[in-house]
Amino acid sequence: MRTHRTFEASITNPKQVSGDLDQLGRAASKLWNVGRYYAQEQWDETGEIPDDGELKSELKGHERYTDLHSQSSQRVLEELAEAFNGWFTKRRNGDSRARAPGYRKRGDSHPRSTVSFKAAGFKHDGQFNRVRLSKGRNLKAHRSDFVLCEYELRPDVDLSEWDIQQVRAVHKYDEWRLHFVCRKVIDPEPPGDEIAGIDLGISNVAALSFGGESILFPGNALKENEYYFGRKKAKCDDSRSNERLRLDRKRTERRTHFLHTLSKHIVAECVERGVGTIVIGDLGGIRDDENGDPRNWGAHGNLDLHGWAFDRFTSMLEYKAETEGSR
C-alpha cells in the first residue's frame, strides 16, 4: 500500500532565492492567463472547454510556456483544466453560484502562483538540506539556470525515508515556502478486528465510541481561537495589511496544530483497543438547507458552521489511521 504525505519546509536562504522564485511565480500566473484566454476562445467558437492535453499541445510553443521548466508549465495547465472540470461539475449538480476560473491578475500586476517541479525539474540534496529547482529557457538568459534553495523541516521528518515525487514553491503570508510531496510503500498489520464510531460536532469536535466506552473531545480551544482572531482581524483597517496576514497565519497554524494533535490522539486510542475499522458520519451538504441555500444560524452560529473544518479533520484521521493498518 502506498501512502502519501506533503511536508512543508521553510526556506533558510530567502534573500538569495526570493527574487528568482518571484519571477517563476509570476510566470506561472501569466501562463495560467494565456491558457484561460485560449480556453475562452475555444469555448466561444465550439461550445466546449479544451482539456489539459489540448492546452499543452496548443501552448507548448508559446513564449510564456518556456518561462518555466516544461513539467512546471504542464502542471499549470493541468491545474487550469482541473479548475474548469470542478466548476462544470458543480454547475451540472445544480450549484448556480459556482463561477468559472478567472484570470490571475491583481490590478496591473500578476500574483505569485504556486510553481510545481516534477522529477525532472528538481534535484534534492538531503545531506545538506538543499533542493535545486529548474527554470525555463527564457528565465535562464541573464541569471543562473536554477534556484538553489536551502530549507528546514520539522525535527521529526526525515525525507530519506520517503520517495519525493514533487516539490512545490508556495507563496503565502508574504514569503516563499517549499512543499515536498512524498510517497512510500507500507504494509502495516491491522491492530485488530474491533470497530469504532466517530460523530463529529462543533461544541465537541469528536465523540469517539467503542461500543461500551465513549470519549468526548471538546472544541472549546478551537472556538476560542476563532472568536479571538475574528475580533483581532476586524480591527485591521486594511484586509491586506501585514498585521491581518500575520493574524491569518497564526490562526491557521493553531487550527492545523489542534486538528493534527487531536486526530493523532484518536488514532492512538483506536490502535490501543485493537480497532481495525473506524466509521465516521458523512457531513456532506451540512452547510446548506433543504433548498440548497446557505444555512443561516445567525452571526455567531454561522461563524461556527462555516468555519467547521470537518472535511479536513476527516482527511487527517484517514491517512493517520491508514499508516496504522486501520481503515
Image: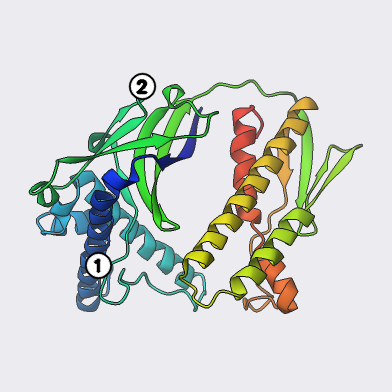
- Which residue is depicted at the point 64% across and 27% down? 324
Q: Position of residue 288 (x, y in %)?
A: 65, 72
Q: Answer yes or no: is residue 287 visible.
A: no
Which amino acid type corresponds to the residue marked 2 in the rendered image? Gln
Q: Residue furthest front?
A: 15
Percent of width and height locating residue 272: 78, 26
- For the residue pair 257 and 152, the one nearer the viewer reads as 152
Task: Give the vertical position of 156 relative to 84 (above or below).
Answer: above
Residue 127 disc label: 2
Residue at the image position 35 percent from the left and 38 percent from the top: 166
Left or right: 260 in relation to 119: right
User: Looking at numbered disc 1 in the image, what kind of residue is underneath it?
Assistant: Asn
- The picture quadrant where one finds residue 13 is top left
Toward the viewer: 3 or 327?
Answer: 3
Q: Residue at x 74, y 60 (%)?
A: 224
Cα separation, mark 1 vs mark 2, equals: 39 Å
Whether residue 292 is situated above or below residue 176 in the rendered picture: below
Q: Quadrant of the C terminus?
A: top right
Secondary structure, mark 1, is helix
Is 307 displayed left or right of 187 in the figure? Answer: right
**Residue 109 bears which disc, if any?**
none
**Relative to 65, is 221 on the left or the right?**
right
Residue wearing tag 1: 33
User: Can residue 9 be seen in the rendering of this structure?
Assistant: yes
- Relative height, residue 130 to residue 248 (above, below): above
